[in-house]
């Protein structure tokens, strides 16, 4: 007879196999990467997650600039630990190191599919955990077969939220894995088992992705509460379980604190982006999203394969299940479904902040609860005709309402009907012999084939439909190709960090090109984009998207001089590198000051004003711009335009037009060069109505060169950067203020005290007698020290719990009894589900 552990392993493997098959089949049908030419890098997948995984690849291979604490490549120097904890601390992320760097897209795809498979395996394992409880209390009870747990586990992994929403937000998939794992911890808490492993699992889930872990923890807590509500133990015993569960969760979160607190603090210091208000979805559209092959960005993706949905719908009608259980599990699923649509509970699910996009991110919890409800419907035997008739009627009614919803099409209705017919047929076939508690294997095989076929067909079709729909509705980015190779090679050839920075270019492939292609630029897009960075570069005329969260590279010679950008890649609009016919990139080089410069003594710190050109001069320390006379710049001057809210083209005289992308407030156009004035009197014209907010300035390159020479003469004679700071030697007799060409984000300290800010950059006051000969600044992300302290205390507590657990087991262990397990009982076995043939 197979052991419980072996049966669980078999079900988990079956769930993983079904999941991988369905996802890959759907992507192949859509000819999406890696099975076709269509890119899957839509929205933040291509703009954030792929570049961040490329950064992780660099760290794992000892490459890149910076380390776990400080990222020198993005935003002229930003904290990396908050990004690591938000995007890259899943254990699956480490697999990226096994792939070649130019196959980073494939690495992220494989990680995504493996996460889905792991979620299905974890759910299948969890479902079979209830077998132990009922087997011990009710000998000879009906035990659903392992393959049923595998099918339901795969159904959970292939829910609409997973294949439609989380497939391009792979960090969310850690929450999909986390929900069944945390529910399993709840099983251990109820039984008083694994007091050490439980907190470790909680810590792993919270470290992997704290955001969805929070939602998964709420879901697991609800499951535990329902189990305790249905338990037969005294109230005091149930309260002890709740306290034990709370202590387990708090201890696990404490162990994760070294990662969690820097993430929280990084969020506090981030640019606010934009705020949104919750709007509930129409119920017809909610029901429509329960069907396969539907897509909409602002409604919950509640699709669940026909078998699980039928069983969950049949639970209230299944009289074999005790009434209290039917009411509790069906009521829990219904209450959570309603909570998606109510503002206060919506805020609770999302940690009291409405998401900027995809507002129903907690939907995976509802999917998990529906799968658990489906399993409870099987716990007392295969549902009879009455239950199937009731469940089928409920789903038919759902389909009729869904047919009125906007996302529903004929394909969705046809797939829904086929899946429902397959599920009903499977549950009828398995009862044909008339012995529902022990169906013959051939009927079980037919039933399993019908359920698996219906699930794979619906999930694959939904995956393919979503692949195509996302490309039409969301921004998308190319998979790594020859253009990436050329850009990355050009940046690597020019790189001389820290002598100067190399910017991968203003015409970007993603908003995180420095991470993806190399170099050290201003571009940076993250949930933790520092407010200091956005406001400082905004004052200098930088452009952005995502309402300030995605700061763009600023192609401006004055700003390049201030931030020591000595090499810059320039490409043609549209992404192909400019230059030779063979596609050789064009590199622009400039003589720039060192990374650390010295500003002369001043009585008062300067402050930014409203003009980016005057702000640039203020930070540079020299006047290099002049205002146009009679609306035109003198011949030989470079003409720059500042029109932050203009969307359209501008041109200088007969020069080629230049595109500006400003769309207040989400997009902002950068200060842009329109070219060199060939003759006096050339004016700036626009292809649309001229913007009211605009400024034209004329750059004198000779003045800029003179200013750079002065900064070089007084700047650092040597600079050394590390993974957590910068050290520089200054010329003898330096006075005034030493300025590091990096934004003064929270966490910088110099000479043992918090660093000063000079117009938004890290600065250090020098001794007035000229005795300061060096600058030593280090960076520690806010929250790291307190997080490490909390983690250390939690670890000590866990070690104490482990010691007490070992001591208790030794005290309770009887003497040896031959080959029998402790206590003289035989090893636990799972009763056979089916009779021998």
Image (cartoon, grey):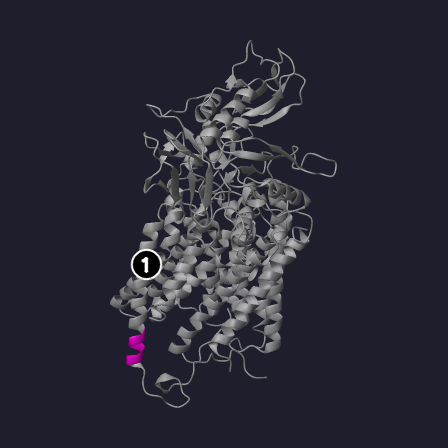
Categorize mark 1 by other alpha carbons within 10 Å: few (<14), some (14-19), many (20+): some
Residues 347 and 167: in front is 167
Q: How many labels were placed on the picture? A: 1
Using the image as rendered, state which of residue 833 and residue 530 is in the foreground.
Answer: 530
Residue 707 lies, in percent from the top left, at: 49, 24
Q: Indicate whether 1 appears above or below 410.
A: below
Residue bounds of the magenta highlight:
806-811
What residue is rendered at 44% in x and 73% in y? Answer: 131
**Regarding mark 1 in the picture, which secondary structure is present there?**
helix
Query: Residue 804: x percent and y percent?
Result: 28, 72
Q: Is residue 402 magenta?
A: no
Residue 679 falls left or right of residue 760: right
* Residue at (62, 56) in percent of width and height: 460
The quadrant in which the C terminus is found is bottom right
Q: Residue at x 59, y 77 (%)?
A: 441
The percent position of residue 520, horizontal first and vertical second, equals 53, 40
Work out whether 712 lies above or below 802: above
Residue 398 visible to the viewer: no
For the question of whether residue 568 can be seen, the reply is yes
Foreground residue, 622 or 59? 622
Q: Residue furthest top?
A: 630
Q: Quadrant of residue 473?
A: top right
Residue situated in front as seen by the camera: 505 or 133: 505
Q: Is the magenta region chiefly helix, strand or loop? A: helix
Query: Magenta span has 809?
Result: yes
Q: Position of residue 500 (x, y in %)?
A: 53, 37
Give the residue at mark 1.
792
The single residue placed furthest to the front in the displayed view is 732
Which residue lies most toward the left here?
236
Residue placed at 60% from the left, 69% from the top? 447
């Amino acid at each position: 007879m197979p052991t419980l552990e072996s049966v669980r392993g078999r079900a988990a493997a079956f769930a993983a196999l079904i999941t991988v098959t369905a996802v890959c089949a759907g992507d192949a049908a859509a000819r999406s990467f890696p099975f076709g030419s269509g890119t899957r890098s839509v929205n933040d997948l291509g703009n954030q997650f792929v570049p961040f995984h490329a950064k992780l690849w660099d760290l794992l291979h000892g490459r890149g600039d910076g380390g776990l604490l400080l990222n020198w490549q993005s935003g002229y120097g930003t904290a990396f630990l908050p990004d690591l904890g938000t995007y890259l601390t899943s254990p699956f992320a480490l697999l990226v190191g096994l792939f070649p760097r130019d196959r980073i897209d494939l690495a992220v795809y494989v990680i995504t599919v493996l996460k889905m498979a792991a979620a299905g395996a974890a759910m299948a394992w969890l479902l079979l955990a209830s077998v132990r409880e009922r087997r011990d209390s009710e000998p000879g009870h009906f035990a659903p077969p392992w393959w049923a747990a595998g099918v339901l586990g795969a159904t959970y992994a292939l829910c609409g939220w997973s294949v439609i929403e989380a497939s391009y937000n792979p960090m969310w998939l850690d929450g999909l894995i986390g929900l069944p794992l945390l529910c399993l911890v709840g099983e251990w808490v109820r039984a008083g088992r694994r007091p050490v492993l439980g907190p470790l699992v909680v810590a792993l889930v919270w470290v992997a992705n704290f955001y969805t872990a929070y939602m998964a923890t709420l879901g697991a807590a609800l499951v535990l509460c329902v189990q305790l509500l249905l338990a037969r133990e005294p109230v005091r015993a149930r309260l002890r379980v709740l306290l034990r569960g709370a202590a387990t969760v708090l201890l696990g979160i404490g162990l994760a604190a070294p990662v969690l607190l820097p993430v929280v603090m990084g969020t506090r210091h981030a640019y606010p982006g934009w705020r949104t208000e919750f709007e509930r979805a129409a119920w017809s559209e909610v029901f429509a999203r329960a069907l396969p092959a539907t897509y909409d960005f602002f409604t919950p993706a509640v699709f669940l394969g026909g078998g699980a949905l039928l069983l969950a719908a049949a639970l209230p009608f299944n009289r074999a299940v005790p009434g209290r259980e039917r009411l509790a599990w069906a009521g829990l699923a219904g209450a959570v479904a309603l909570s998606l649509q109510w503002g206060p509970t919506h805020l609770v699910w999302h940690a009291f902040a409405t998401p900027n996009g995809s507002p129903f991110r907690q939907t995976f919890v509802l999917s998990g609860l529906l799968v658990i409800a489906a399993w409870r419907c099987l716990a007392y035997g295969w549902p009879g005709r009455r239950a199937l008739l009731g469940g089928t009627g409920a789903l038919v009614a759902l389909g009729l309402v869904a047919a009125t919803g906007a996302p529903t099409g004929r394909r969705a209705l046809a797939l829904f009907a086929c899946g429902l017919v397959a599920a009903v047929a499977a549950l009828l076939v398995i009862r044909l012999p008339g012995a529902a508690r022990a169906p013959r294997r051939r009927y079980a095989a037919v039933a399993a084939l019908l359920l698996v076929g219906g699930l794979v067909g619906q999930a694959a079709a939904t995956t393919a439909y979503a692949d195509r729909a996302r490309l039409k509705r969301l921004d998308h980015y190319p998979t790594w190709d020859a253009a990436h190779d050329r850009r990355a090679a050009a940046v690597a050839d020019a790189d001389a960090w820290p002598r100067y920075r190399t910017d991968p270019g203003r015409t970007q492939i993603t908003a995180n090109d420095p991470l993806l292609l190399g170099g050290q630029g201003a571009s940076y897009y993250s949930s933790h984009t520092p407010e200091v960075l956005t406001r400082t570069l905004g004052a200098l005329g930088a452009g952005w998207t995502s309402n300030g969260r995605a700061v763009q590279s600023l192609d401006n010679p004055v700003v390049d001089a201030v931030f020591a950008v000595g090499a810059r890649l320039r490409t043609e609009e549209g992404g192909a590198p400019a230059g030779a016919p063979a596609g050789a990139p064009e590199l622009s080089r400039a003589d720039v000051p060192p990374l650390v410069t010295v500003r002369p003594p001043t009585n008062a710190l300067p402050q930014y004003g409203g003009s980016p050109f005057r702000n640039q001069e203020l930070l540079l320390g020299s006047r290099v711009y002049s205002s146009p006379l009679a609306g035109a710049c003198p011949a030989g001057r470079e003409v720059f335009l500042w029109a932050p809210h203009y969307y359209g083209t501008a041109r200088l005289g007969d020069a080629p037009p230049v595109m500006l992308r400003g769309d207040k407030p989400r997009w902002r156009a950068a200060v842009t060069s329109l070219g060199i004035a060939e003759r006096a009197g050339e004016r700036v014209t626009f292809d649309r109505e001229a913007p009211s907010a605009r400024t034209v300035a004329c750059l004198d390159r000779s003045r800029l060169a003179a200013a750079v020479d002065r900064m070089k003469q007084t700047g650092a004679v040597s600079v050394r950067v590390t993974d957590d700071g910068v050290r520089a030697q200054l010329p003898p007799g330096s006075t005034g203020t030493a300025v590091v060409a990096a934004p003064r984000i929270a966490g910088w300290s110099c000479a043992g005290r918090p660093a000063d800010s000079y117009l938004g950059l890290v600065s250090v006051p020098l001794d007035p007698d000229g005795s300061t000969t060096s600058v030593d600044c280090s960076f520690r992300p806010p929250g790291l020290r307190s997080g490490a302290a909390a983690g250390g205390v939690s670890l000590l507590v866990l070690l104490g719990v482990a010691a007490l657990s070992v001591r208790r087991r030794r005290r309770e262990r009887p003497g040896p009894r031959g080959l029998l397990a402790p206590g003289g009982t035989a090893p636990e076995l799972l009763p056979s589900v089916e009779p021998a043939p």
